[in-house]
Image (cartoon, helix red, strand yellow):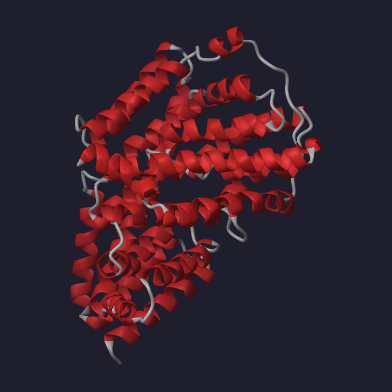
């Protein structure tokens, strides 16, 4: 049996293990170990697994994940998310559909502190849903707008998926962060446009709230929100300016948010402990998935599947954008069943060489496109992680009601994807202008 056939069998075995509900990290590691053993030797496979696991968990580069994750959980447990929503609500909550539109703005700003789609959805869901219920918003629109808004948490920097993509492909995390800014803003505006269009057609979907005075709007900046925005600007701005490495930028951000939370007395001892516990759990999960993906990637390398796929794609008599469309379609399908982070780790060894080395696409642009495509999976059935998060926040609301409201936001995601494909400069102009 040739190596390519063994590689394809390994991929099928991986999906079989997922159907049997084995954790993704362990499924990748097990298949990678078994396939590497068959193609080399058991001794070499044990050595490879030990070496790659140690290198992953001892990697200084991966500590950037812990810093930005902790920054997000500190913001969550200190209640900064509620301040963000209150500010957005005071500014535009008086418009038709204004609460749902304000939720998108709050998700975007919280995503700039957090970097996790599920944490963004959970935070904004707990804050925004009671307000939208109070003003009798259509429950499908209310829940779907929060679930979709969580996607902004992985597109607007800092983003855990951008970090993992950057480490997997040896691309600059700073450039990836910068490349996600304009697409994130574009997606937020498209979400707002969708909400405005829906409410314009049927005003009963999102009745307007009371209009706040400018004094109330200015007052909503107090209580730590303004200071947090300064900390974020220092952390991410320092990374872009070259003052900090990614890990140092995350440490500055986490220390700044912690200092503000303590000075404002916005975090309890119990909240502080929970932030450390959740950070440890999330970071360990990510590192396990990275280790499993590296082991699986080593198996793919010796099986030569990625190289054969690259040669096959390069020989196709089609323009590069047709091949890229097929790749993105595969991502869309897989994203319906596999977690976003796991999907990136699993597929990068296979599709990155094709997109960059054979088709000639910009690796930074490709990273933004991949993050956007896999983010669609967090709001599509049957996995739809963000939808299940909202279900956990509001258990009385049936899943089908939430999924029913998702489709207009998926349309906005497709429009955003199409715009970025036609105008790739939207993603690349900031890194090229400011860092080169």
- Identity of the residue furthest to the bottom in this view: 1
**Whether residue 216 is situated above or below residue 338 in the rendered picture:** above
Q: Position of residue 171 (x, y in %)?
A: 24, 51
The residue at the point 62 percent across, 33 percent down is 101
Q: Quadrant of the N terminus?
A: bottom left
Q: Position of residue 164 (x, y in %)?
A: 33, 51
Q: Can residue 65 be seen from the camera position used here?
A: no
Q: Can residue 165 be seen from the camera position used here?
A: yes
Quarter-of-image position of residue 278: top left
The residue at the point 37 percent across, 73 percent down is 319
Q: Quadrant of the C terminus?
A: top left
- Identity of the residue furthest to the top in this view: 215
**Whether residue 150 is situated above or below residue 338 in the rendered picture:** above
Q: Is residue 325 left or right of 206 when viewed as pictured?
A: left
**Whether residue 81 is situated above or below residue 332 in the rendered picture:** above
Q: Is residue 368 left or right of 128 when viewed as pictured?
A: left
Quarter-of-image position of residue 139: top right
Query: 207 or 120, which lies in front?
Result: 207
The residue at the point 79 percent across, 40 percent down is 202
Quarter-of-image position of residue 232: top left
């Amino acid at each position: 049996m040739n190596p390519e056939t063994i590689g394809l069998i390994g991929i099928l075995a991986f999906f079989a293990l997922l159907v049997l509900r084995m954790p993704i990290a362990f499924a990748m590691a097990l298949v990678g170990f078994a396939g590497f053993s068959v193609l080399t030797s058991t001794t070499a496979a044990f050595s490879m697994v030990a070496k790659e696991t140690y290198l992953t968990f001892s990697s200084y580069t991966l500590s950037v994940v812990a810093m930005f994750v902790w920054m997000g959980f500190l913001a969550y447990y200190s209640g900064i998310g509620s301040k963000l929503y209150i500010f957005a609500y005071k500014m535009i909550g008086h418009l038709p559909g204004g609460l749902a539109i304000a939720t998108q703005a709050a998700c975007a700003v919280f995503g700039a502190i957090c970097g996790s789609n599920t944490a963004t959805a959970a935070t904004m869901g707990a804050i925004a849903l009671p307000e939208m219920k109070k003003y009798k918003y259509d429950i499908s629109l209310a829940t779907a707008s929060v679930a979709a808004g969580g996607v902004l948490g992985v597109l607007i920097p800092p983003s855990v998926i951008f970090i993992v993509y950057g480490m997997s492909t040896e691309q600059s995390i700073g450039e990836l962060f910068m490349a996600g800014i304009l697409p994130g803003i574009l997606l937020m505006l498209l979400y707002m446009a969708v909400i405005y269009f829906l409410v314009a057609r049927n005003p009963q979907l999102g009745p307007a709230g009371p209009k706040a005075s400018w004094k109330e709007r200015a007052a909503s900046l107090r209580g730590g929100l303004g200071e947090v925005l300064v900390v974020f600007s220092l952390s991410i701005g320092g990374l872009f300016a070259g003052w900090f490495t990614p890990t140092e930028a995350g440490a500055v951000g986490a220390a700044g948010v912690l200092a503000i939370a303590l000075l404002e007395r916005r975090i309890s001892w119990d909240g502080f402990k929970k932030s450390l516990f959740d950070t440890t759990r999330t970071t360990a999960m990510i590192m396990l998935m990275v280790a499993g993906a590296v082991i699986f990637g080593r198996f793919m390398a010796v099986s030569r599947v990625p190289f054969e796929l690259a040669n096959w794609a390069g020989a196709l008599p089609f323009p590069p954008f047709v091949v890229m469309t097929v790749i993105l379609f595969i991502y869309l399908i897989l994203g319906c069943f596999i977690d976003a982070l796991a999907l990136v780790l699993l597929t990068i060894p296979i599709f990155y060489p094709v997109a960059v080395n054979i088709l000639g696409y910009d690796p930074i642009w490709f990273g933004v496109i991949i993050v956007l495509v896999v983010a669609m999976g967090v709001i599509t059935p049957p996995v739809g992680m963000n939808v299940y998060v909202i279900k956990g926040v509001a258990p009385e609301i049936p899943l089908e009601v939430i999924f029913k409201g998702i489709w207009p936001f998926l349309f906005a995601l497709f429009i955003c994807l199409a715009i970025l494909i036609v105008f790739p400069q939207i993603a690349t102009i900031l890194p090229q202008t400011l860092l080169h």
